[in-house]
C-alpha cells in the first residue's frame, strides 16, 4: 500500500497525471455551491476524508485510425483517523464532454406523413457523459445531493434555451437521454468502480469512437451514507492530431481554400481514373 | 479498418465507404447518372450527419462527372452552348438552394423536405422512364418504325431564340435557363448532381437528341456541384475531405467497371433496370414518411 501510494506521488510529479483534491466544487456558473460540504453534517463521519487520484492519461489524441480509447482513473482515500464505522464508503466517477446546445424534435402525423412539429431547445447538454459507480446509484446517492452536484444522467443537461412552448418538456429531455444512451454517448455503469478496503479505487472508462474535441472533465465523488464527502476534479484534453487536426483547422480557418482543395482532389481523381483505365484497356 | 472522419466527427469503416462508393460508381457507369441520389441516402443510413452527407455527396459527384465528361468531350457529344445556358441557370439555382437549405434548417424541416423531394422526383422520373423504356422495347421488336427528330411543343414558341448547333435546336434560352435553375436548387438541397432530373427534362421538355444529352448534362453537373461544394464548405464547413476521398476512390473504379458492363447490355434493358432501381429507392423513402417511426423524437445539434 505504501509503495503503491509512493508510485502515485511519483506519477503526479512527472506530470503524466495530476490533480488536486479540493473542497467540494463543480461548475460555479451552473448552480451555487455551499462553502461547507453538508448543510446537516452527519455527526458520526469525520470530514477529513479526501480523494487523491490520477488518470492514466490527461489527454486523448484523435488520429485518423482512432476508434475509441480507454481511460484508467485510480486513486486512494486520504484520512487522518481510522475508518469510521457505519455504511461503507462509496465512489462515483463521471467523465463529461464539453456541453453544446441541442434541439429535440417530436414528430407528428400531419396529412398522412410524419413531420417535425414541436421542439424543445436545451441550452447545454454534454456530447458524452459516463457515470461509473461502486454500487447501484440509487442506493448510494441521495436525490438532494444528486441535484446539488448534478451526477446522474437526468441531470446531465443544464438549461432550456428560450421559451419552452410545449406543455411538458419531460418527454423531450427523457428522449434526449434515451437516444444518447442508445448511441452509447450517455452511460451509467453501476458497480464498475472497484473499491478495496474503503481506501483504494480504480475505474476504467471507455471513450467511444465518435468523440468530439474539447476539454473533458473527470469528477470523482466520495460518498458516505448517500452524502457527498469530497469531490476531485481533473481535466482530460481531447484533441485531433496530425492530418485530422490539419484538415479540421483548414476547413474552419480557410474554408474557401479548403473547398477548392476538395474540388482539386475530386477533379484529379476523376481525370486520373479515366486516364488510367483508358491505358489499361489499350494494351 | 476504422477511420475517424475529421469534419463529420464519427468513426466509420473505411472499406464500407470504399464499397459504397464502388457500388454507386458501378450504377453511374452503367446508367450514366452521377449517383448522388443514391449516395446521399446511403450516407444517412450509415450515420453520417445529413448536412455533411449532402455537402460531401456533392463533392463526390464532381469526381464521377469529371471522369464522365472527359470521355464525352473526346466523343464530341457535348453541346457547350446549351451547357453554358444550363450552367448559368444552375449557378443561380445552387445559390438559391443553399439559401433555402439554411432556412429549412432553422425551422427544423430540412429532413422532411429532402425526403419529400426525393419521393416526388424519384417517383415521377421512375414512372416516366419505365413507361418510355417499356414502350421502346416493345417498339424495337417491330421493324419499320422511324422516329421523328424531335417533337415541337409549347416550349418552342418562347422569345429570345438561339441556335444550339450541336443539339440541332433553335429555341428560346428561357426553358434551358429554367431547367438549370431547378436542377441547381435540387443539387444544393438534395446533394445530388441532378442528372436524373435533367436528362429527362432535356429529352422531353427541350427535345434535345439523346446522343448529346448525357455529355451536356455531365458538363453542367460538374460545374454546378463544384460550385455547391465550395458554397457548402464556405458557409457551413460541412465538406469532409476524408469521407469524399474514400467515396471517390471506390466511385471512380466502380464507374469504369460499370461502363464496361454497360457496353454488354442492351440500352432498353438498362433503362428498365434504372427505372426499377429509382422506384425502389423512392418506395423505401415514401414508406419512411408514412409509417409510424420507431422513435417519435429526434435530436438536432444547435439551438437556432
Image (cartoon, coloured by chain):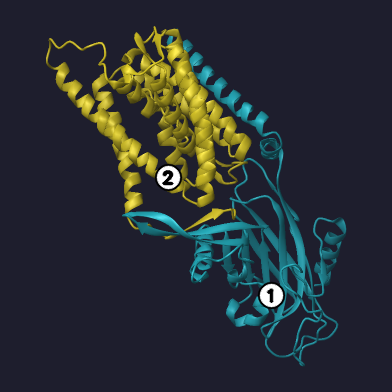
Residue B275 visible (yes or no): yes
Which image quarter holds the N terminus of chain A?
A: bottom right
Location of residue A75 (image quadrant): bottom right
Q: Which residue is drawn at 80% across and 68% down?
A: A4
In the picture, which chain is cyan? A
Location of residue B229 (image quadrant): top right
- Above or below, B102 relative to B197: below
Q: Using the image, name the chain to which the residue with label 1 belongs.
A: A
Q: Name the residue under label 2.
A: B113
- Above or below, A69 relative to A144: above
Q: Mark 1 points at which residue?
A: A91
In the picture, which chain is yellow? B
- At label 2, counting other C-alpha atoms closer than 10 Å, the crowd grade (few under 14, some 14-19, many 20 or more) is some
Q: In this view, does A129 lie to the left or right of B104?
A: right
Which image quarter holds the C terminus of chain A?
A: top left
Q: Residue furthest right?
A: A13
**Residue A115, x across and y down, in percent:** 40, 54
- Residues B240 and A255: in front is A255
Q: Using the image, name the chain to which the residue with label 2 belongs.
A: B
Amino acid at each position: 500500500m505504501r509503495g503503491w501510494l509512493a508510485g502515485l506521488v511519483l506519477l503526479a510529479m512527472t506530470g503524466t497525471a495530476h490533480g488536486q483534491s479540493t473542497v467540494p466544487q463543480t461548475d460555479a456558473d451552473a448552480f451555487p455551491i455551499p462553502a461547507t460540504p453538508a448543510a446537516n453534517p452527519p455527526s458520526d463521519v469525520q470530514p477529513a476524508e479526501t480523494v487523491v487520484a490520477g488518470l492514466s492519461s490527461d489527454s486523448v489524441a484523435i488520429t485518423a485510425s482512432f476508434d475509441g480509447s480507454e481511460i484508467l482513473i485510480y486513486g486512494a482515500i486520504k484520512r487522518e483517523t481510522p475508518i469510521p464505522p457505519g455504511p461503507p464508503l462509496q465512489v462515483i466517477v463521471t467523465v463529461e464532454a464539453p456541453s453544446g446546445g441541442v434541439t429535440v424534435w417530436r414528430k407528428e402525423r400531419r396529412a398522412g406523413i410524419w413531420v417535425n412539429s414541436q421542439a424543445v431547445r436545451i441550452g447545454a447538454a454534454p456530447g458524452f457523459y459516463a457515470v461509473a459507480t461502486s454500487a447501484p446509484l440509487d442506493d448510494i446517492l441521495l436525490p438532494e445531493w444528486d441535484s446539488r452536484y448534478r451526477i446522474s444522467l437526468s441531470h446531465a443537461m443544464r438549461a432550456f434555451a428560450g421559451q419552452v412552448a410545449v406543455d411538458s418538456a419531460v418527454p423531450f429531455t427523457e428522449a434526449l437521454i434515451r437516444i444518447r444512451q442508445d448511441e452509447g454517448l450517455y452511460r451509467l455503469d453501476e458497480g464498475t468502480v472497484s473499491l478495496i478496503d474503503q481506501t483504494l479505487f480504480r475505474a476504467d472508462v471507455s471513450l467511444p469512437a465518435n468523440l468530439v474535441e474539447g476539454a473533458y472533465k473527470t469528477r470523482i465523488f466520495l460518498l458516505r451514507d448517500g452524502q457527498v464527502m469530497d469531490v476531485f476534479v481533473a481535466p482530460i484534453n481531447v484533441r485531433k492530431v496530425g492530418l485530422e487536426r490539419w484538415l479540421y483547422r483548414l476547413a474552419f480557418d480557410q474554408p474557401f481554400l479548403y473547398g477548392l482543395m476538395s474540388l482539386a482532389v475530386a477533379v484529379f481523381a476523376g481525370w486520373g481514373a479515366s486516364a488510367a483505365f483508358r491505358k489499361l484497356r489499350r494494351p | 479498418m476504422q477511420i475517424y472522419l475529421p469534419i463529420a466527427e464519427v468513426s466509420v469503416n473505411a472499406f464500407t465507404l470504399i464499397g459504397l462508393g464502388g457500388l454507386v460508381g458501378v450504377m453511374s457507369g452503367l446508367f450514366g447518372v452521377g449517383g448522388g441520389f443514391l449516395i446521399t441516402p446511403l450516407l444517412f443510413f450509415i450515420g453520417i450527419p445529413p448536412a455533411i452527407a449532402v455537402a460531401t455527396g456533392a463533392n463526390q459527384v464532381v469526381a464521377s462527372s469529371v471522369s464522365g465528361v472527359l470521355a464525352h468531350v473526346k466523343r464530341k457529344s457535348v453541346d457547350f452552348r446549351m451547357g453554358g445556358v444550363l450552367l448559368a441557370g444552375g449557378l443561380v439555382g445552387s445559390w438559391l438552394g443553399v439559401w433555402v437549405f439554411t432556412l429549412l434548417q432553422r425551422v427544423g424541416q430540412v429532413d422532411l423536405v429532402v425526403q419529400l423531394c426525393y419521393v416526388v422526383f424519384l417517383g415521377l422520373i421512375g414512372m416516366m422512364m419505365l413507361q418510355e423504356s417499356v414502350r421502346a422495347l416493345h417498339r424495337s421488336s417491330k421493324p419499320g418504325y422511324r422516329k421523328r427528330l424531335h417533337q415541337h411543343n409549347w416550349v418552342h414558341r418562347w422569345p429570345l431564340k438561339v441556335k444550339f448547333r450541336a443539339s440541332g435546336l433553335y429555341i428560346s434560352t428561357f426553358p434551358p435557363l429554367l431547367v438549370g435553375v431547378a436542377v441547381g436548387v435540387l443539387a444544393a438541397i438534395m446533394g445530388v448532381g441532378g442528372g436524373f432530373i435533367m436528362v429527362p427534362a432535356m429529352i422531353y421538355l427541350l427535345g434535345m437528341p439523346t446522343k448529346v444529352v448525357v455529355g451536356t448534362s455531365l458538363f453542367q453537373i460538374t460545374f454546378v456541384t463544384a460550385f455547391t461544394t465550395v458554397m457548402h464548405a464556405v458557409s457551413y464547413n460541412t465538406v469532409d475531405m476524408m469521407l469524399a476521398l474514400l467515396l471517390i476512390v471506390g466511385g471512380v473504379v466502380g464507374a469504369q467497371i460499370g461502363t464496361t458492363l454497360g457496353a454488354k447490355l442492351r440500352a432498353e434493358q438498362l433503362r428498365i433496370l434504372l427505372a426499377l432501381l429509382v422506384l425502389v429507392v423512392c418506395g423505401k423513402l415514401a414508406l419512411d414518411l408514412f409509417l409510424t417511426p420507431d422513435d417519435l423524437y429526434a435530436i438536432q445539434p444547435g439551438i437556432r
